[in-house]
DNA sequence: CATCAATCTGACCGTATGGTCAAGTTGAGC
DNA sequence: GCTCAACTTGACCATACGGTCAGATTGATG
């Protein structure tokens, strides 16, 4: 028992507690949805009294907003590999890997995001209209360039992006269904590798971006 | 105003009212989630007093259960086209068409299903373990046969099925995001056709099931 | 060690919600 | 037109929830 009961330093206390709360909140929001989540449960899971949550986050909605925003950031960062790539095979391959890894490491976050969008994005509509719209347009241009350079088949860039999002996020959002069909077991390391390989194979082949006849 | 205020016949009254309630419930559950939905709102949307809902459906959960079950049925029926098909190109193509059509016609239902699975299927876990598991195994066998007959490339059948589910249901579950990226407009008929074509092209090509060099 | 802002927390409050109920109303069957 | 089961509904209740608050505690600072 390394139960750390030393009196906490003042330094970084806020940061530490907010992290505790945000982690608990992400899980609870993911499992129960915004409406089903209760501040009491988040409090219990983070080990803090409920009134303390309201000290750091005045309302349930403000806490929820932070959770969604944090996820969106992680989600956007996965795009870097896309941009840095030389061609479609490398770029899309790396993007799939990155997003699959997010689905594996942050399944709760992905679920919160999905839930938010499904409920017509009451909290992050502005992000969709600005940041996400710009991001999508930028990536679509890259894809169109690749097509014009003959490095992949002509496909509607938007629908390709939707397919990338759908397939990769599916492994987080529907993990419970996948686990059930996997005999009730979470996917093993090897199965995750196989999943990544399958997605990459089908999509890259599907857009004619796989160089060797493999 | 054809406001039908004639006294209702006894015949089929129950059926009629249940349908009214179920339609309203599907929308409300889809937009607010189980926890966020209120019986009062469902009552208002169906034009019936709240106490009347509890006459037909004793609890909120029993109403919700019916909504989810109904969706699951629709969802399963789309599989018929898969089975009837002669080969992968025809079967998977028809399955994509059928599921895309469901996404278009029953977006609320798809969202309720997604939400239920994301929340660890508290209500339909038994369906996942029995009906869905059997269905998946059956379809996986068909795919494996096609592979052995050399009519498509070797791919893990489960991951192919996940991709089919993910891509088609994405157009329902994330319709708000898609609409936003579409300039705030819902997808037109032509855009739906393009979406279907894109999904089919990439996946069928991706598994080597497209006969002509098209 | 006195000060003070930051942090903590048990007790409390107003409200919204799922669900109940008893008293009606309706219409098919005779 | 009488009977009775099916249906309808306004009023009501217990509970759970988000949020508040006043008073206590803590620890950095001088």
Image (tube, coloured by chain):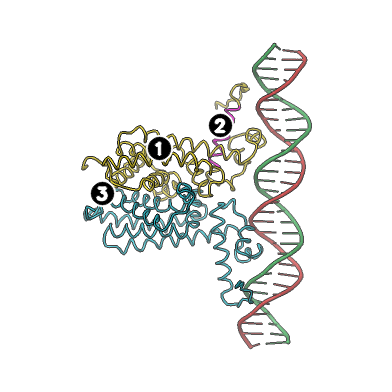
Chain colours: A yellow, B cyan, C red, D green
- Which numbered disc, 1 or 2, marks the residue that appears first in the sequence? 2
Which of A85/D14 is in front? A85
| Badge number at residue A209 | none
Q: How many neighbours does mark 2 have within 10 angstroms: few (below 14), some (14-19), or many (20 or more)?
A: few
Magenta span of residues = A14-28
In the displayed structure, A150 sits above or below B190; it is above
Considering the whole magenta stretch, tell me its main secondary structure.
helix
SS category of the residue bearing label 3: loop
Pointer 3 local density, CA inside 10 Å: few below 14, some 14–19, many at least 20: some
Local crowd at mark 1 within 10 Å, few (<14), some, or many (≥20)?
some
Disc sitting over residue A101 in the figure: 1
Q: Quadrant of the N terminus of chain A?
A: top right
Q: Secondary structure at mark 2?
A: helix
Q: Residue at x 38, y 58 (%)?
A: B135
Picture residue at 57% right of the left edge, 39% below the top: A65
* Letter of the chain that mark 1 sits on in the rendering: A
Where, by quadrant of the figure, is residue B8 drawn?
Answer: bottom right
Query: Rounded to the nearest whole Å, what is the CA distance between mark 3 and mark 1?
Result: 24 Å
Label 1 SS: helix
Between residue B206 and residue A31, name the one nearer to us. B206
Per the model, the C-alpha gap separating discs 3 and 2 is: 45 Å
Residue B69 location in percent, x, y? 49, 60
Label 1 and label 2: CA atoms lie apart by 21 Å
Label 3 marks which chain's residue? B
User: Chain for mark 2?
Assistant: A
D2 lies above or below A151: below
Residue corresponding to mark 3: B154
Compared across the picture, whether A145 is left or right of A180 comes to: left
Q: Position of residue A13 (x, y in %)?
A: 60, 25
Name the residue tied to disc 2: A19
């Amino acid at each position: 028992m390394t139960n750390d009961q030393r009196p906490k330093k003042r330094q970084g206390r806020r940061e530490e507690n907010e992290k505790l709360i945000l982690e608990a909140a992400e899980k609870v929001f993911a499992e129960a949805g915004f409406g089903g989540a209760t501040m009491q449960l988040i409090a219990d899971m983070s080990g803090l009294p409920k009134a303390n949550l309201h000290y750091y986050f005045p309302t349930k909605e403000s806490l929820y907003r932070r959770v969604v925003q944090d996820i969106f950031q992680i989600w956007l960062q996965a795009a870097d590999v896309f941009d840095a790539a030389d061609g479609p095979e490398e770029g899309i391959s790396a993007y799939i890997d990155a997003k699959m890894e997010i689905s594996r490491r942050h399944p709760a976050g992905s679920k919160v995001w999905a839930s938010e969008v499904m409920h017509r994005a009451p909290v992050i509509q502005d992000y969709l209209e600005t940041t996400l719209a710009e991001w999508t347009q930028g990536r679509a241009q890259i894809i169109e360039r690749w097509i014009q350079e003959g490095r992949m088949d002509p496909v509607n860039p938007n629908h390709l992006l939707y397919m990338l999002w759908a397939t990769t996020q599916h492994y987080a959002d529907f993990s419970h269904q996948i686990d059930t069909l996997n005999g009730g077991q979470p996917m093993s390391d090897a199965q995750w590798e196989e999943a990544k390989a399958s997605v990459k194979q089908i999509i890259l082949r599907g857009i004619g971006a796989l160089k060797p006849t493999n």
